[in-house]
Amino acid sequence: MTSVASRQLPARSLSLRTAVPRISTTRRVGPALVVAVLGVLAWWVAAIVLDSRIFPTPAASMRSLFADLATESFRANVLDSLRLLVAAFVVSVVVGSILGLALGLSAFWSRTVLPIVYSINSIPKIVLYPLFLSFLGIGQLSRFGFAFYAAFVPMLIMAVESASAVNPLHLKMAASLRMSRPRLVRQIIVPATLPALATATRTTFGLAFLGLLLAEMFSSSSGIGYEMLRNVSLIRMENIMGTVVLIVVIALPPTIALQALEHRITARFSGSNH
């Protein structure tokens, strides 16, 4: 009877994985595209109705964006922001996940560190930006540091909470079996926390991008945020709206990809903590 049960176990786990309904790419991306198209149409109608020089049409904004992209300095600023964004996002996800899981699995360190982390997270992030300028100076290091900070703290908190939510029965069984620490992390902790970490990763990307843009707008001589602030100071509305479109175009594909990854991970590991 034991051998029969062991042979049936893989089939049962496979059925649990396939029982979760899969969302097609069209159904996942389609509504967002419809909303985007409706937003552009509303923008166009509003610009025509208002007939104001300070509210350009989408066509005028796109012409200004293409004109900016034709200049080498603008392209260099865009690439500079993209490089810092990727670095800050990846580092914040990796470091935040590792430290968060380690803290979440330790009751002592959770009680010691978490109140401080929650207090820091409650402070408006832009208030602390002068500290980054004081210690890191004006340049790429302070921009990277602030983008990392804006994404790292929420990632750390969500990782801690995901680790704290691991089924304690599974941990007790692992302790009774004297399971090694690497095996415990690989077979119990990671499957149980991956859905929450996937959600945190998707959220972290937007926070890293926001932190980077704020840093570039307040004190920088390069980057997309710098270009945005320069256009605002010159009251060039077409260029401002064109830069906004560029920011949306940059942010949308990674967000959609991270959301699709989140759905797949959730469907794969949603029952691992029950």
Image: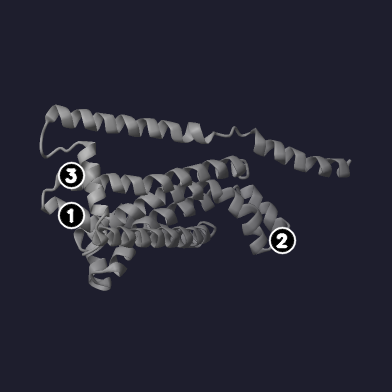
Question: Judging from the image, what secondary structure is the residue with disc 2 in?
Answer: loop
Please determine whether, in this image, residue 164 is positioned above or below residue 179. above
**Residue type (three-letter) at the residue carrying disc 3:** Glu
> Is 194 left, or right, of 131 in this rendering?
right
Q: Which residue, given by chain and number where applicable, does mark 3 sit on?
A: 238
Residue at 83% across / 43% down in the picture? 7
Distance of label 1 from label 2 (alpha carbons): 58 Å
Q: Which residue, given by chain and number where applicable, does mark 1 sit on?
A: 229
In the image, 224 versus 181, the foreground residue is 224
**Residue type (three-letter) at the residue carrying disc 1:** Leu
- How far across and how far down the image is residue 160, in percent? 48, 54
Distance of label 1 from label 3 (alpha carbons): 13 Å
Upstream in the sequence, badge 1 or badge 3?
Answer: 1
In the image, 210 versus 5, the foreground residue is 210
Q: Which residue, given by chain and number where applicable, does mark 2 sit on?
A: 178
Residue at 67% across / 60% down in the picture? 183
